[in-house]
Image: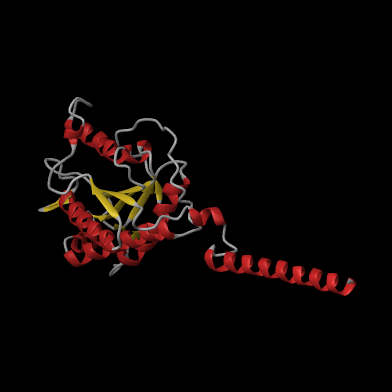
């Protein structure tokens, strides 16, 4: 009798050890152990994520320009290419504009100038979109023609926005440092941005300056479809990496209220 009891006890120990082993295997292969399990469960799959693309300017607001090359046309062209690339990956895309127009009509009784209504309307669009994140596309300009490259801006004191900006910037740097000339300086780092759409949006986002129209090299590249495609693909790759990275700070929590700013 004692022998039977001992054998039964040993069998139960083997079953228990087997269950523990199976649990460890499950954690390793299905939860990507030893990664943080909560971070993995927050990951967005393509069919669930909705993204807003905001092509800067439009209509009577051409943005920065050199000759016939206008910021509003560059941003819309890149935005459409980005939309197409993300939709091919299964994401749901909403755009603040898809033609050469501004979006000031979204707040007809808002701020007194059309420009300010347009700026506020873009933030309104983002906040009412039900999206998970947004990207606003612009072209930069400065007095120094030797400065070139991309700058991705993030909102103040928001880890998600900063993480998104960092990943997009890393992908853009592979594209924008093209044919460097003596004396040129390439921007390669993110910056905190004081922009209305960043400061007042309730979802994570980044404002992307894809190049400097005041630099001859950037201006030449920005005028070509091939370079715009590369920029769009780089932004697309950055967004996807952010969404699918289990270790990125992408919990999609609402941003705290921040002071109003029209820039």
Q: Which residue lies furthest to the left in this view?
A: 68
Q: Residue at left 18%, top 54%? A: 74
Measuring from the top left, give residue 259's x and y in whole percent: 39, 30
Residue 152 visible here: yes
Question: If the image is split into quadrants, where does the N terminus sit?
Answer: bottom right
Q: Is residue 108 above or below residue 154?
A: above
Q: Residue at left 34%, top 56%? A: 47
Question: If the image is split into quadrants, where does the C terminus sit?
Answer: top left
Measuring from the top left, give residue 167's x and y in whole percent: 41, 58
Q: Where on the picture, by quarter, is residue 192?
A: top left
Q: Residue at left 18%, top 38%? A: 103
Q: Which residue lies furthest to the front in this view?
A: 1
Measuring from the top left, give residue 147's x and y in whole percent: 30, 56
Residue 184 visible here: no
- On screen, residue 37 versus residue 147, left or right, reads right
- On screen, residue 111 versus residue 247, left or right, reads left
Q: Residue furthest right?
A: 2
Q: Where on the picture, by quarter, is residue 128?
A: top left
Q: Is residue 40 above or below residue 19?
A: above
Q: In this view, does 30 lie above or below 51?
A: below
Report the front residue among 175 and 111: 111
Report the front residue among 109 and 93: 93
Q: Residue at left 10%, top 53%? A: 68
């Amino acid at each position: 009798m004692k022998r039977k009891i001992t054998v039964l006890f040993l069998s139960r120990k083997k079953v228990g050890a087997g269950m523990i082993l199976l649990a460890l295997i499950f954690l390793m292969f299905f939860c990507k152990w030893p990664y943080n399990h909560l971070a993995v469960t927050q990951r967005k799959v393509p069919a669930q994520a909705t993204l807003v693309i905001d092509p800067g300017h439009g209509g009577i607001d051409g943005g920065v320009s050199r000759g016939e090359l206008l910021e509003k046309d560059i941003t819309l062209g890149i935005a459409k290419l980005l939309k197409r690339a993300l939709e091919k990956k299964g994401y749901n895309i909403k755009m603040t504009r898809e033609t050469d127009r501004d979006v000031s009509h979204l707040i007809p009784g808002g701020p007194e100038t059309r420009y300010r209504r347009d700026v506020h309307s873009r933030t309104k669009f983002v906040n009412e979109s039900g999206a998970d994140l947004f990207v606003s596309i612009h072209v930069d300009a400065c007095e120094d023609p030797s400065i070139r490259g991309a700058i991705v801006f993030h909102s103040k004191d928001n880890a998600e926005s900063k993480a998104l900006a960092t990943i997009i910037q890393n992908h853009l740097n592979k594209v924008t440092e093209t044919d460097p000339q003596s004396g040129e300086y390439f921007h390669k780092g993110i910056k905190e941005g004081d922009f209305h759409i960043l400061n007042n949006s309730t979802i994570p986002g980044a404002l992307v300056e894809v190049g400097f129209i005041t630099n001859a090299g950037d201006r030449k590249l920005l005028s070509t479809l091939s370079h715009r495609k590369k920029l769009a693909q780089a932004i697309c790759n950055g967004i996807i990496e952010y969404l699918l990275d289990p270790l990125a700070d992408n919990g999609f929590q609402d941003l705290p209220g921040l002071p109003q700013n029209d820039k």
